Amino acid sequence: MTMNPVGRPTGIEAVEMEHPQTFSGDRGLDHEEPLLFELGREGMCGVDIPQAQISDKRLGGLQRKKPVGLPGLSEPEVVRHFVRLSRMNYAIDAGLYPLGSCTMKHNPRLNEKMARLPGFGDLHPLQPERTVQGALSLIAELMRWLTTLTGMPAVAMSPKAGAHGELCGLLAIRAAIKSRGEQRRRILVPSSAHGTNPATAALAGFTVDEVPALANGHVDADALERMLANDVAAIMLTNPNTCGLFERRIRELADAAHKVGAYFYCDGANFNAIAGRVRPGDLGVDAMHINLHKTFSTPHGGGGPGAGPVVLSAALAPFAPLPLLVHDKGGFRLIESPDDAPPSTKPFGRMCAFHGQMGMFVRALAYMLSHGADGIRQASEDAVLAANYILASLKDVLSAPFEGPCMHEALFDDHFLEGTGVTTLDFAKAMIDEGYHPMTMYFPLVVHGAMLVEPTESESKESLDRFIRVMAGLAQEAKSGRKERFAGAPYLAPRRRLDETRAARKPVLRWAPKDAAES
Amino acid sequence: MTMNPVGRPTGIEAVEMEHPQTFSGDRGLDHEEPLLFELGREGMCGVDIPQAQISDKRLGGLQRKKPVGLPGLSEPEVVRHFVRLSRMNYAIDAGLYPLGSCTMKHNPRLNEKMARLPGFGDLHPLQPERTVQGALSLIAELMRWLTTLTGMPAVAMSPKAGAHGELCGLLAIRAAIKSRGEQRRRILVPSSAHGTNPATAALAGFTVDEVPALANGHVDADALERMLANDVAAIMLTNPNTCGLFERRIRELADAAHKVGAYFYCDGANFNAIAGRVRPGDLGVDAMHINLHKTFSTPHGGGGPGAGPVVLSAALAPFAPLPLLVHDKGGFRLIESPDDAPPSTKPFGRMCAFHGQMGMFVRALAYMLSHGADGIRQASEDAVLAANYILASLKDVLSAPFEGPCMHEALFDDHFLEGTGVTTLDFAKAMIDEGYHPMTMYFPLVVHGAMLVEPTESESKESLDRFIRVMAGLAQEAKSGRKERFAGAPYLAPRRRLDETRAARKPVLRWAPKDAAES
Amino acid sequence: MRYLPLTPDDRRAMLRTIDVPNVDALFRDVPKEGVVGREVFDALPDHKGELEVERTLSRMGALNISAGSVPFFCGAGAYRHHIPASVDHLIQRSEFLTSYTPYQPEVAQGTLQYLFEFQTQVALLTGMEVANASLYDGSTATAEAVLMAQRLTRRPKAVLSGGLHPHYAATVETLASLSGKVVHADAEPGRAGDLAKLIDDETACVVVQSPDVFGLIHDLKPVADAAHAKGALLIAVVTEVVSLGLIEPPGAMGADIVAAEGQSIGNGLNFGGPYVGLFATREKFIRQMPGRLSGETVDAEGRRGYVLTLSTREQHIRREKATSNICTNSGLCCLAFTIHLALLGDKGFSRLARLNHGRASSLAEKLAAVKGVSLVTPQFFNEFTLKLPKPADEIVDALAARGILGGVPGSRLWPHQAKMRDFLIVAATETSPEEDCDAFAQALAEVVS
Amino acid sequence: MRYLPLTPDDRRAMLRTIDVPNVDALFRDVPKEGVVGREVFDALPDHKGELEVERTLSRMGALNISAGSVPFFCGAGAYRHHIPASVDHLIQRSEFLTSYTPYQPEVAQGTLQYLFEFQTQVALLTGMEVANASLYDGSTATAEAVLMAQRLTRRPKAVLSGGLHPHYAATVETLASLSGKVVHADAEPGRAGDLAKLIDDETACVVVQSPDVFGLIHDLKPVADAAHAKGALLIAVVTEVVSLGLIEPPGAMGADIVAAEGQSIGNGLNFGGPYVGLFATREKFIRQMPGRLSGETVDAEGRRGYVLTLSTREQHIRREKATSNICTNSGLCCLAFTIHLALLGDKGFSRLARLNHGRASSLAEKLAAVKGVSLVTPQFFNEFTLKLPKPADEIVDALAARGILGGVPGSRLWPHQAKMRDFLIVAATETSPEEDCDAFAQALAEVVS
Ligand SMILES: Cc1ncc(COP(=O)(O)O)c(C=O)c1O
Ligand SMILES: Cc1ncc(COP(=O)(O)O)c(C=O)c1O
């Protein structure tokens, strides 16, 4: 090839070789990145803060004796570090993210913008109430949407995520039972439940009795009814359930529970399938958390933060935790003490400091206003439609343990992989090579090698069709014996498979300076 | 491998195969992305705007007859589309970007935030002046920084980029000459000049005479002096020049030009090497543009926007274009008409609508305030230091056409590739595989197979050392005959080498619907 | 100094490698009289932390009345539209914001593809065959169009319609009169004017803006025919591209070149810049076109990709023979434009345009109902001109004192032209709610009486 | 409906594939009484465009007085600090913002690595051996710490110091009293209090906050010794982590568990949430630790990488035997924390802490000089408590009326506790300029007199 000054058209010749090993370890746009602690240098700093002259007379001799040991980096290095790290992540914004039970739907940027308005983002939780009337009215408006959509009379806003909401609901149940002068310690939880359900029940001081699942993916309602007794505090069902099915006998089970004096806690993680079409309040639910970070699209942020408001039935509403938001002639007020609570109420305590995940509230309300009640209904329908479309298109290619229709998740098992030597895990990792985030694997536990696919309403038909084609292609590949395509996958991601056994056996949970590590 | 529910530690087995071909065409986190026009569907829409009822009585029968033909996409699709496109780009934030003459330095996010303050970003250019006093004072403050740093008495703010600044400067020169009742049509431009210099001279109605370069990379000052005559309007030098050198005889040349009645236009693209240490005003410069998007860090944005204010000597200041910014008892005012201009001035005309790149002004001033005069000086020193460090470290590994020290760019040629079959272009493409953006290639034209490396002050020593190691490694590789590593490069980027000849021979400059294309 | 990663130790070690005693030695080529110390810049402060910079600039910003904080009706070449939040988010992605011109296409496909999409969108909007990857803004695009017409026709004269934004006219004059001749038709608010009589055999082009600076929309067909009859080109100028969602595009009315300001789509007011110049023309003219072009091609593995192409028109290759001196253009503003228009699509764009026209029409009725006020532009898109019973600048000041930014007075654009003094140019967009329009009408009634 | 990509045609085609007549058929498992129509939600409006949503919410936002718009001195568990612009930019990158918990480590190394870095930073700051990948906030972290101590010691009783933020104490009480016993020491502003006497053989832990809710800083050594002597653990609580840049860390004073609120670093006030709970402890306790952990390992090619590890402590594996029920935590807030602290480094962090202490010290002098006002916290970091001659809530209201947010009155945190009524808790940070402090002092003098 002759000299080709920039801009002079350059032709192409076919030159081929194995992909080169690079000196840098980087590969094109895929950069490796050391730890912050390996990058920093003493004395370097990414902010400019003047050195204040202070005296030590107000420190009581408690000054820090040794430096913290934080690395020093300039701003450009810090920015580059995190930009590079980000580029090693999958994201909804980059592709379909069919993680069942997680509702990875589109996160509108409008919501981010709204949450950052100084009138919301820059308010202190303990400012005088009359300086935050707009913020309190926003919370009240969100409460109105949540109670209206669920058909429930009350909602507790402080829980910080779904599991925290579960705790709040069970503590309200505990308080209600106590106020009746009773002692009930059992909670019935289906075997298909999400891990937080039994964990929360235990945390709230209950014992957990597992309810079996039927072969059709529904909870064994008969068994459940048999297990109900006077010592049962609550039944804790997920609906739509974790197999992606609507529990048909839900109303009946609620009634049965109520008949023995138990409450019905509903895990609302899957509310996205039914919002705007079905009101849990019509089905006998006493408490249900709503993951704003699922149904109402506050971003998952790599694992949080979320928000888990809990709607409550009339029976449980009086026990809602502090603070309470009330509106009277003086405007909105927060009640922070049981002494100030309305006589009809008996707050069971407090879930956390302050009054909940305001940043998430703003985002969720922006989402609701944008969709409207009509759009929320349409979104649920589309989510269910998309899941059923996937189920219908793939049930003969993969294997589906249950009959359709499903709700907003399509569940597959590993039956179709039998004899191929390919596991659900392998299959998931091969999806990574194809540019997809895997579905939820091995959950729910009631299905062998479960693959729980939740496309959400955010995907176009073209996107779903493409996903279906790729999944079918992979299934074909597995069945035709190309095991290494799966067993070694992913080949094309920033990392190949990681050794989790090693990580757990000799945990390295932090960086330590070389000499410290050696000693 | 046995079933490995998520969270249960997974070990790793060594399974190897060729990188798989995927069904999707995607490869892990590297997604392919169709054109917007291939994604859209009729009737779909990424905004919610009500359908307004309008009458046609005010349209004069000029309604659009056919739809525009824009594709319809929902917001999630649009976001994903552009996120995916972005991931195919290299960026300063992701790595060293040693593009000589372009000053790819760190772009602080503070500057983005400041430019978006409603008090700047949401102002209309024709609002009443007393509603924009803060904005006008910001422009005045930036003018003060620019004139102080350059030691020049005046600055014209409206030029929209470097080349536009050149035009502004040359038009001022033209006007000055005209006002002297003279007719001079020649501009002397070194052969090493950036393409905009001769192009601008031609655009401004001058003829271009090329001044040769010396073997040492400096302009041939003797030749230039010989070329000076009464018909020369200006000399147009870049300083530091495009070979990365400071023109030693600059002051002498300025004097010589002035002696024959010519002006000295200085291309200030390389001001980053000397800001805070050297004032062009002390060297006899009459006009110089400053690329705010280089020296003062307004982001390049994939090719713009920039801003190219032009500082002017006392001789040229009166001819600065409209609008003029003045301050009097009423506050700041914009003068938009020659009739209102101070008697001492004779604006040559107007460069564009309104008063320049305000968004860039805010960013540049934020940069200046952050650095301070001390920081700007330090930045220049660091930029020069970094380039010399690279030159010193690589001059015996690659080949350097000129003796050091250099200014903020280290220039290499392709001498070291002689006989290897590897060209500068090939070498550059191999850098891409190593995770680096190539340096500027084949510019300046006065050096064979030029490689112009500008590290800027934004890189740490560790980063420079790593770059040097990789460059040395590649040079070694080239010399040891691994031609295919270069000739086929890049192997690891989103695209292999692109066929520019084909693009130019049968230009496809837009998408067209299939049937239209076929017809 | 948070942006500078070198430590004093680093600097010392580097100087050792370079083998010089200090950094001054690196500047040894600078003549003595050129080297100055920090003290020379005493008027400039030392470096500051973010908090302090933010405070200083916020204070300056707070001295201005931002458009969004009051009822707002200014146009005349820059328009306030609602920009979806995702636009501003996406353009700030590092890979878009902090990359250079896509000179290395293998690692710049993101930029090259959106430029290709941008070119397509601009061609579709304007009804032209091809478009470039942007110029600085509408005014410089217009000037470049005139130069291109002069090159194509090898004729010197450009005829500018009276409805051309006066800043645009001045920009064209500055550049195109260097080697040619620029003739300005009279500005008559609300009238089409007779351009045909100004076109002769020397005429390279006629430049007509529609909607014009007064808001009047024009049928370009007659002037296109008149121009073509004499071998001249028609350059159509659009400063409010949203109008193209409702109004017949210049390409359908015979334009040879379209120069437009793209700010309305995706880009904020920014006190005048940065904006984005759109430039579209006929395919047969592309080799005389200014500006960058992204073109489709394939890579060594046969995959579709994009490159900057036809660079032989450009300064870095052709130097003094280039079609323009432009280098840096409006990259990121193109991106904002492309994203916003992608969100709009045909449906949203047409609805946006209708909404704008509806708002402006209803506002025009309201304002024209004020005693002494008359509407002089019978047909318009989202902007119109009123004749007031008093000098418009006084009215605008009085409105501003009442917290209303009520449009652009004639004297602002045509200083010292007495006949323009009483005209007020008023724009309304989707961001002007009904209640703001009512407040405007009421205030206007108060201040004119 | 801009967020929904399916067209009516798509929906019809999909229903055909599924082989059902309409979408209602997909909901056939829902009992009749459960299915409702749009009309049931009549109280809720239809969908709205961005512009309208923005207007509605901005109007609500404008009804509040934002901290940055006035002289501002509130603390008591949430602190206003300057957050560098790059922090908020980086956390909004799609790949961080719109990703889930890193369950698939091969495509989540970005998240896993920053969590590993976060854990390291938290361990360093607190002077502890290990830290987890965050809990919800400081208050829930404190409650989890108490439960962990109960598990580790198999003892029921938790002793809470009087200086523990009352919201924290209530949170602990709610949870830890379910299966144990919570003893609250008296709150005495400015006094250390004698906790040793409350520790007995039943005591699982003592919980001490420093700086405490009044701002007082404590030497934890004596209480650590007292606790350890009885086989109990010391839980140290920090609500203002910036203090750790100047004050001896709990780990150096004998703490066994540190629970802290990380909001001050990288995270805005947000009216109370989301915040980020920091949790650090001794290495030997990790198997009883709540929350996620990112751990180092290698991939199949031997390259270093990170995974979620020790998941057998967690609910998704261990279910009712898990160490906590937490699942979603504070991911993105950790990221903001990690980035901000990376920018600060040792130098910046120490300077920030000194600046805070300096501001607060000077403000304390100024305010204590007001007649009738006295400082009750002799040693403090950036927050202190004043005794006022009148109920503090009245003073705070009077200050607010003068446009100053002058701290948190005792009655806000301890409603109905008369002895707390006259105390005012005041915080000053680097965002409180001298002139704001002066304005505060002057206004206070006016309103107390
Ligand atoms: C069914 C179900 N229940 C509860 C939860 C817990 O919610 P969170 O993570 O918000 O605590 C999840 C979260 O994945 C879930 O899928
Ligand atoms: C030396 C030199 N002069 C002039 C220019 C033109 O500046 P701009 O791109 O801002 O028009 C450049 C830009 O690359 C340059 O490097």
Image (tube, coloured by chain):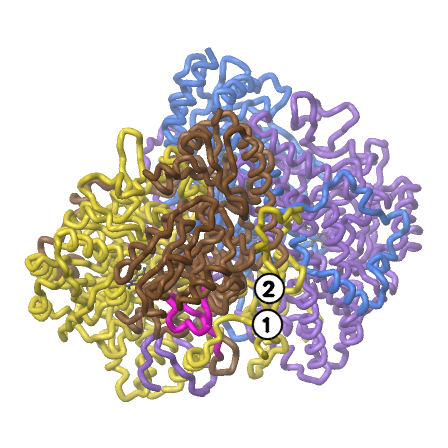
Chain colours: A purple, B yellow, C brown, D blue
Q: Is residue D8 left or right of residue A80?
A: right
Tag count in the figure? 2
Which residue is situated farthest in the front direction here?
C197
Cβ of mark 1 under 8 Å from ligand 2: the answer is: no
Question: For residue B515, which quarter of the picture?
Answer: bottom right
Residue visible at 44% across and 37% down in the picture:
C423
> Which amino acid, by three-letter code, is at mark 1?
Pro
Dot 2: element:
loop
Q: Chain of mark 1?
A: B
**Picture coordinates of residue C122, whole percent (x, y):** 50, 62
What span is colored magenta in the figure?
C280-297
Does residue C289 belong to the magenta stretch? Answer: yes
Does residue C189 belong to the magenta stretch? Answer: no
Judging depth in this view, the residue of A126 and D89 nearest the camera is D89
The circle drawn on residue B513 is 1
User: For the residue carrying disc 1, how many other residues have a C-alpha within 10 Å: few (<14), some (14-19), or many (20+)?
Assistant: few
For residue B397, say whether it is visible.
no
Establish whether labels 2 and 1 are both on one chain.
yes
Question: For residue C29, which quarter of the picture?
Answer: bottom left
Judging depth in this view, the residue of B433 and D418 nearest the camera is B433
Q: Is residue B247 above or below residue C383?
A: below
Q: Which residue is mark 2?
A: B69
> Which amino acid, by three-letter code, is at mark 2?
Gly
